Image (tube, coloured by chain):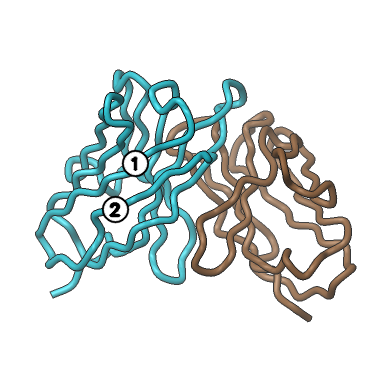
Chain colours: A cyan, B brown
């Protein structure tokens, strides 16, 4: 079964740090680019970051650039998001999603179940 | 950044209704457009990719059309499990922006 499972979310104070993980199974993780997408409570979807299959290409949303770092370990079938200098507005459910398809920019499938990050004092 | 605008933001419909959701891009994105369905407390699910291709396992009552700046998601006959929020997404450029969502509610 194709599966992505996020972990590492929790409550953190403003200015703090957190590291999210996404464990992949059921597909050849090393062949897929990956993304992090977040959703603030009651709000829509916001793309956060992208990493290519070999880690050679990385992109960030302006809202997290300089504070978040995406990485992956293909030997461990795992994706990571290191989040530093967290702000109240980073409170959200964070999803990892595989970038599938080789044309028209691809599409996000599958998605993990999400992990909740709450930034509050 | 490319802005994606969906309309309406919400709609009320009954089982069996034909439902149409529109997504407009702030610039031409060819067919670099995907549609997702999200139910409360769940992850988004891919419905349509490349504007009009139906994802495997998705019922044929869902269809997508359009190219350039204007796109449409149509549900030909709304079923009980289709009450959800729908998002469009462009993959023409980074950041991969989403529309604000369209919530389909029970009338």
Q: Residue furthest bottom?
A: B107
Q: Quadrant of the C terminus of chain A?
A: bottom left
- Please determine whether, in this image, residue A63 is positioned above or below residue A71: below
The residue where tag 2 is placed is A7
Q: At 17% from the left edge and 45% from the top edge, which residue is drawn?
A: A67
Residue B49, picture quadrant: top right
Badge 2: residue crowd in 10 Å (few <14, some 14–19, many ≥20) = some
Kindly identify which numbered label has been placed on residue A48.
none
Q: Position of residue A116 (x, y in %)?
A: 32, 63
Q: Chain of mark 1?
A: A
Marks 1 & 2, CB-CB < 8 Å contact: yes
Badge 1: residue crowd in 10 Å (few <14, some 14–19, many ≥20) = some
The residue where tag 1 is placed is A23
Q: Position of residue A72 (x, y in %)?
A: 27, 31
Of residues A100 and A46, the one nearer the viewer is A100
Task: Kindly report the distance in space between the C-alpha atoms of the residues bearing marks 1 and 2.
Answer: 8 Å
Q: Chain of mark 2?
A: A
Q: Position of residue B52 (x, y in %)?
A: 76, 36
- Please determine whether, in this image, residue B90 is positioned above or below residue B14: above
Q: Is residue A12 left or right of residue B41?
A: left
Residue B51, picture quadrant: top right
The secondary element bearing badge 1 is classed as: strand
Q: Position of residue B63 (x, y in %)?
A: 80, 45
Q: At 26% from the left edge and 28% from the top edge, which residue is drawn?
A: A73
The secondary element bearing badge 2 is classed as: strand
């Amino acid at each position: 079964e194709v599966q992505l499972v996020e972990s590492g979310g929790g409550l953190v104070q403003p200015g703090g740090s957190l590291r999210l993980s996404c464990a992949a199974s059921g597909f050849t993780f090393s062949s897929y680019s990956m993304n992090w997408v977040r959703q603030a409570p009651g709000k829509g979807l916001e793309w956060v970051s992208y990493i290519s299959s070999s880690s050679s290409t990385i992109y960030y949303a302006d809202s997290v650039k300089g504070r978040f770092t995406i990485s992956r370990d293909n030997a461990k079938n795992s994706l990571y998001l290191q989040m530093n200098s967290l702000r109240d507005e980073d409170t959200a459910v964070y999803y990892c999603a595989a970038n599938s398809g080789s044309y028209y920019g691809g599409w996000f499938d599958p998605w993990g179940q999400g992990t909740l990050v709450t930034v509050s004092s | 950044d490319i802005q994606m605008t969906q309309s309406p933001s919400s709609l009320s419909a009954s089982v069996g209704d034909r439902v149409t959701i529109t997504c407009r891009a702030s610039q031409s994105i060819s067919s670099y457009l995907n549609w997702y369905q999200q139910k409360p407390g769940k992850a988004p699910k891919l419905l349509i990719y490349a504007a009009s291709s139906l994802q495997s396992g998705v019922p044929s009552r869902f269809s997508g059309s359009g190219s350039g700046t204007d796109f449409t998601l149509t549900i030909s006959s709304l079923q009980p499990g289709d009450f959800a929020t729908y998002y469009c997404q462009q993959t023409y450029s980074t950041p991969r922006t989403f529309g604000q969502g369209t919530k389909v509610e029970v009338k």
